[in-house]
Amino acid sequence: TGLFTYDSGFAATASCKSAITYIDGDEGVLLYRGYPIEQLADQSSFVEVAYLLMHGELPSKDELADFDHKIAHHTMMHEAFKNFLGGFRHDAHPMAMLVGMLGSMASFYHNDLDYDDPDERRLAAIRLIAKVPTIAAACYRYSVGWPLRYPRNNVEYVERFLRMMYEVPSEPLVLNPVAAKALDLLFILHADHEQNASTSTVRLVGSTGANPYVCVASGVAALWGPAHGGANEAVLKMLDEIGDAKNVQSAVDRAKDKESGFRLMGFGHRVYKNFDPRAKIIREMCHKVLDELGVDDPLLEVAMRLEEVALKDDYFVERKLYPNVDFYSGIIYKALKIPTDMFTVMFAIARTAGWVAHWLEQQTDPEFRIGRPRQIYTGARTRDYVGIDRR
Ligand code: CMC
C-alpha cells in the first residue's frame, strides 16, 4: 500500500539513461559502447577499453598514446598517503584499506578542481584510473610488510601494476606475457556492467554533487559484498572447502537446500538468465593460463565438475542459474599468485574505468538530479508519546 511502485532490489526500475554498456541477459550479450565484449577481449587492451568507456569512441593511435601517457603520469601517490597506510592494522583486509585510501584521495586532489570544466572532470577520472593500481599494490605490500615500490611510467598498465606488486630491487620481475595478457583480459571483462550495485552507488553518490573520489570509494564499498565483487574471493574459498571433485554433489545439494544458507558462489546473476558471456571467455582463458604457466590446480577440476553437475540439475536449470564472471576468475588470479584477499581489489581496479565513465556521463546528463528513492512505509501509525515511567 502506498503511493509508489514497489520494486525490491530495483529489478524492474531504470534509474538513468546511459549510452555506455548494453546487456541482453536472455541472449547473453554484453556490449561496451556497441562493441561486443568477445571482440574487445580478443583485440583490445584495458587502457583502450577505459578510453572507449569514457569517450564513447575507440581512440586513434595518437589519442590512445596521449591517454596512455596521461595515465602513466598520474600514477604516483602523494608521499603523505603512507601515513594513512601506516594507520591500518597489519592484517587489514585490502578492500578495507582501498575504501579508506580512496576516500582520503579527496583530501589531496579535490580542492583544486572545477567540475564544471570537462577537462578537469576528465583529469579526475584519469587520476582515479591511474592511481587505483598504485594504491592497490601499496595495500598489498603493506599487508606483507614490504617497502612500497613506485610506479614505472615507461611500461604498460598491467606490467606497471605487477611490478609494483611483486618486484624487489635486487630481483627485477621477469614478466610472463601470458600472465600479463590474462590480467589485461580480466580487467577488460570487469571494466563495466551498467547499473550493477557498485555503479549505481557511484551514481547515487554522484547525484548529490559529491566529488568523484568519494563516489568511487563508495563504489568500492558496494563492490566488497559477496553477492557482488566479493564473490570471486568467496568462490575460491568455496572451491577450497569442497576440496575434491567427489564432494561436488553434496555441495550442490546443500546449495539447493534453502535452510543451509549456502549458495553456490559464482553462480546466478540478476540480469543474465543465460550463460554470462564473460564467464565463457574467462573459462577458456583459465585453461590457457594454467597450461602455459604449467600450473596443475586441482581446484580447476572441482570447478569444472561443479559446473557440470549444477548445469544438469533441475534446481539450477529452472532458475536459470549459470556460472557468472566470478566463477573462473579466481582460479586465474590464483595461478598468477595474486593472494585471495586481493581478488576483489583486482575487480575494483578494472571497474574504476566503468565507475568514472558513469560519473562523467552523469555530469552531462540533461536530466541530472539528485537520486532519491521512495519507500513503502510499514511502521506504526501516529501514536502518542508515553513517558518512560509509564512504559
Ligand atoms: N546458489 C543457489 N541458489 C541460488 C543462487 C546460487 N548461487 N543464486 C540464486 N539462487 C536461487 C535463489 O535462492 C532463488 O531461489 P527461489 O526462487 O527458490 O527463491 C532464485 O535462485 C533467484 O535468486 P535471487 O536471489 O532472487 O536472485 P537475485 O537476482 O536477487 O540475485 C545474485 C543474484 C547474483 C546475487 C545471486 O544469484 C547470488 O547470490 N549468487 C551467488 C553470488 C555471486 O556469484 N555473485 C556474483 C554476481 S556476478 C558479478 C558481480 O555482480 O559482481
Image (tube, grey):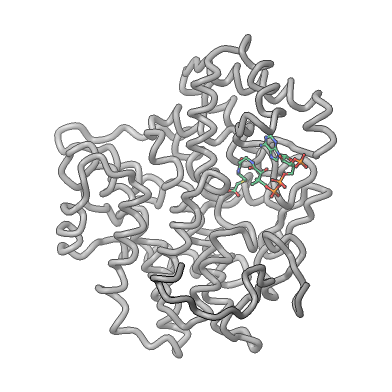
Question: What count of labels does the image hold?
Answer: 0
Q: Which quadrant, please, contains the N terminus?
A: bottom right
Quadrant of res 259: top right
Name the residue rendered at 17%, 38% in the picture. 145
* Residue closest to the eye, 364 or 101: 101
Name the residue rendered at 34%, 60% in the picture. 131
Can you say whether 100 is above or below 120 in the image?
above
Quadrant of res 311: top right
In percent of width and height, residue 367 lies at 65, 87
Can you say whether 17 is above or below 91 in the image?
below
Quadrant of res 253: top right
Name the residue rendered at 59%, 79% in the picture. 383
In percent of width and height, residue 125 lies at 43, 71
Can you say whether 68 is above or below 93 in the image?
below
- Determine whether, in the image, residue 99 is placed left or right of residue 67: left
* Residue closest to the eye, 143 or 285: 143
Q: Quadrant of ligand 1?
A: top right
- Determine whether, in the image, residue 118 is placed left or right of residue 24: left
In percent of width and height, residue 93 lies at 33, 44
* Residue closest to the eye, 128 or 390: 390
In percent of width and height, residue 5 lies at 77, 73
